[in-house]
Image (tube, grey):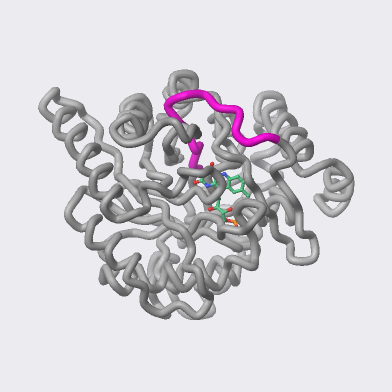
Amino acid sequence: MYAHIRPLLFALGPEEAHLLASTGARFAQKVIPSLIERMFAFSHPALSVQVLGLTFTNPVGLAAGFDKNARLVPFFRLLGAGFTEVGSVTARPSRGNSRPRLFRIPDQEALINRMGLGNHGAAKIAPRLKRVAHQTAFPVGVNIAKTHSPGILGDEALEDFAETYRRVVDHAGYITLNVSCPNTAEGKTFEDPAALDTLLQHIDAITAERQREGAAHTPPLLVKLSPPERERFVLDSLYDEILAVCATHRVDGFVATNTLPHDKGGLSGPPLATRSNALVRYLHTRTNGSKPIIGVGGIDCAEAAYERLAAGASLVQLYTGLVYHGPGLIARIKQGLVRLAEAEKYASISQVTGSRT
Ligand SMILES: Cc1cc2nc3c(=O)[nH]c(=O)nc-3n(C[C@H](O)[C@H](O)[C@H](O)COP(=O)(O)O)c2cc1C
């Protein structure tokens, strides 16, 4: 069906198409939830994954940036995703960069975006998360970032990040620190190992304070990283420094990767796949598989998802693939994963993780 809808969406500008699709999804999740659920139904016990202290009915989730304002959580559950990652959420509301800021590269099925972290802000989004977060077994991750404003620096930047963390922490299945946004001037400040160390110290202090106050819930914490600069990447001292810093704090896993810096913004889709795959393999090997990885970047079919799991990811996420292949992609990937795992005699998809490192 998407083959018929896509030309209509692609006749619009990319951002207008996203707005239309999101509005349609919000309408559909309210008005025809059981129809959506039936249309995209596919479940299989072999797809279940237990990781990060959470249970995922399947390993295929929505990547950050699609549902920045936590409006579409029910929709992606109905579509059969195993989880979703809302955000990036920032402390202050922001409109992001000026338009045009999203571009299609159809011959590569890729996108370039310089959206710039526009969102409604943590104070508005937290109550929405509260309403949806504890529905059934559907983990809702919350991706948080520093407010898009080059004026917020130093201690103020730390406090800005911390404010968002405090607001969303009670309603998050897991939290991702987005320290790798390539399309704001200061979006990668905290990927610098020394700055990351300070940020993680700050988060550790909040966790300790919450535990003293008797907080019942401390969600797992993940760090989202940039893709390697080169495709033929083997070892990189920056990632080793980042891993060393993370090892001294409470970091439970990684999301690899964000978009690839490009002069117009960040590149996503298949051109990112080799780099994202390489970083997943590297992280999995360097941590001896002790830190779960969410693999993201250029996954647009079951084979690509399977490859990412085999490289060391426990879960995968999609964004650009959904734009080019439509919402049915999630169910197709799940079906393909079962087939591919059975062909290699794995009883469960979690046995595929790290099988080809
Ligand atoms: C339009 C757009 C907006 C995005 N916004 C965010 C964001 O706010 N926070 C974030 O961590 N990643 C964001 N991403 C990155 C995606 O989560 C993902 O890491 C990247 O697109 C690679 O996956 P893909 O090739 O499946 O799209 C965005 C990507 C796109 C295309």
Instruction: Name the residue nearer the viewer: 80 or 101.
Output: 101
Q: Position of residue 335 (x, y in %)?
A: 61, 62
Residue drawn at the location 68% of the way across and 34% of the way down:
98
Q: Main secondary structure of the magenta part?
A: loop
Q: Is residue 331 above or below residue 205?
A: below
Give the side of residue 190 with respect to residue 118, left or right. Answer: left
The image quadrant that residue 301 belongs to is bottom right
Q: Residue furthest left?
A: 212
Residue 135 versus residue 350 in the image, above or below? above
Q: Is residue 113 visible?
A: yes
In the rendered image, which quarter contains the C terminus?
bottom left
Residue 86 located within the stretch drawn in magenta: yes
Residue 76 location in percent, x, y?
59, 40
- The foreground one among 202 and 256 is 202
* Residue at left offset 41%, top offset 52%: 224
The percent coordinates of residue 147 (x first, y second) are 46, 32
Residues in magenta?
84-98
Percent x, y of residue 353: 40, 69
Measuring 58% from the left and 71% from the top, which residue is drawn there?
339
Q: Is residue 169 visible?
A: no
Which residue is at a point 27% across and 68% down the rendered structure image?
Answer: 287
Q: Is residue 305 magenta?
A: no
Question: As drawn, is 327 to the left or to the right of 258?
Answer: right
Question: How many numbered callouts?
Answer: 0
